[in-house]
Amino acid sequence: MSRAAIALLALALLPALACAQSPDRIAAGAQAVKPKVVDWRRDLHRHPELGNQETRTAQVVADHLRALGMEPRTGIGPTGVVAVLEGGRPGPRIALRADMDALPVTEATGLPFASTVKSEYRGQPVGVMHACGHDMHVAILMGVAEALASMREELAGEVMFVFQPAEEGPPVPGEVAGAKRMLDEGIWDDFKPDAVLGLHVWSRLHAGQIGVRAGPFMASADEWTLEITGRQTHGSQPWAGVDPITVAAQVLLGAQSIIARQIDITAHPVVLTAGQIQSGTRFNIIPDAATMVGTLRTFDAGVREDVIARFRNTAEHFAAASGASATLEVAGNAPATSNDPALVERLRPSLERAAGAGNVVEVPRYTIAEDFSQFSNVVPGLYFFVGTTPRGQDLASAPMNHSPLYAPDESALDLGVRAMLQATVDFLDGAASAR
């Protein structure tokens, strides 16, 4: 039996956690870092960086970890930071992950610490904003690191802090980035954790709430590119060429019939979306080619392969019917995220201790995606949501993650620290006591 399986089995058999850290000690640790976490978050929000460009963020993180007495490894994947905290008592290993990258979004929140950063994304000038809340994730994990470091002598086992770049996907299509790149570069070669934890701030929950789900949780994410090649002609004589724009429109509508008429979506939720169509330069010229870019979201690997095959077949046949050709390329950015049921069962009480039993809710499957799955496919993982919409505000109308208006309630920072800290200490002390 593997080390991770033994640790989880031991946890499952424990009637109660024999914690070396009292709840008061954990609460005091979280309270001590609370003002710093807010300051870190606002600083990071004001200075967002796109994926694989998080050099300033990485420097802030590395300096903080060094000040806590750790020896961080930097330049991983290429801007990631990793550090290990060794407790004073023997015990298991756990990894805690936070993502660092911002989005190519121009901020419209009006916050006093709003971003005014400009950059370039895939050849286009863009504003840059922490529209998904990764600034909060980094600040939370920095706070957790400081709180755990203050408990070092009483802590059981070892904790690896993973600050990851490029969760939002590779800056270059098809490039290996994010969690997979960090794993490929060996962050767990010498430190194989028994479990990995992560969190995400989330606008579809109210501040003070935590959302969790055992088993399949978030969909896989594929980025697809479809090239339609026709034949250029004058716009006044479409019969003299092959119009790739018309073919692209036919393919896009035909692709939706795959989901509506060919997939049992009652059993297998699937989303196939085009987010960009580019073609032509002038009103009266039919161009040679059209390019569509989009995303595919699925929860099952077999269904994913089936939809890709059907999409390719649909595109090629619509194109052939008009005398054009179609080439589909699909890049898998993240597998589906699934929470280990035993880990959820054992650590749900930890989340309830942090938020209150009535504030930990079961969430549905979401077709959003997270490359945390790269880590949790290697070792048992627990990923949970922390609500950011103020109490009393309608969840459906609140600006969602990725919106230029996303302005999360900062009380989520404190809850995030307390939840991650409680779950970490409970896991380490519970597994250590069962050995």
Image (tube, helix red, strand yellow):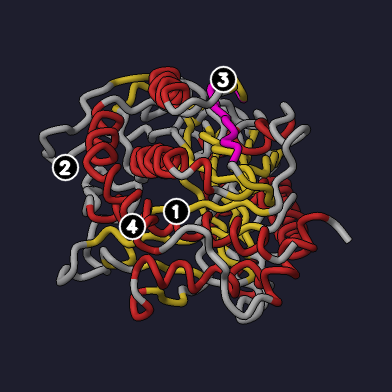
**How far apart are labels 1 and 2 at the CA level?**
30 Å
Relative side of 141 to 154, left or right: left
Q: Tell me which residue sits at (73%, 61%) in the image.
A: 7
Would you place residue 36 above or below residue 29 in this image? above
Residue positioned 60% across, 50% down in the render: 156
Q: Which residue occupies the foreground of this view, 100 or 259?
A: 100
| Mark positioned earlier in the residue sequence (2 or 4) | 4
| Disc 3 element | strand
Of tags 4 and 3, which is closer to the observer? 4
Query: Above or below — where is 381 with respect to 151?
Result: below
Report the amino acid beneath label 1. Answer: Leu
Asked whether 137 or 369 is in front, the reply is: 137
Determine if residue 421 is in view.
Answer: yes
Which-is-in-front pick, marks 2 and 4?
4
The answer to which quarter of the image holds residue 76 is top right
Foreground residue among 275 and 60: 60
- Quarter of the image that includes the N terminus: bottom right
Residue 70 falls inside the magenta stretch: no
Range of residues picked out in magenta: 77-87
| Residue count near mark 4 (Cα–Cα under 10 Å), binned few <14, some 14–19, many ≥20 | some
How far from the left and from the top, in percent, is residue 45?
27, 33
Instruction: For marks 3 and 1, give the one nearer the viewer.
Output: 1
Alpha carbons under labels 2 and 3: distance apart: 32 Å
Which label belongs to residue 74? 3
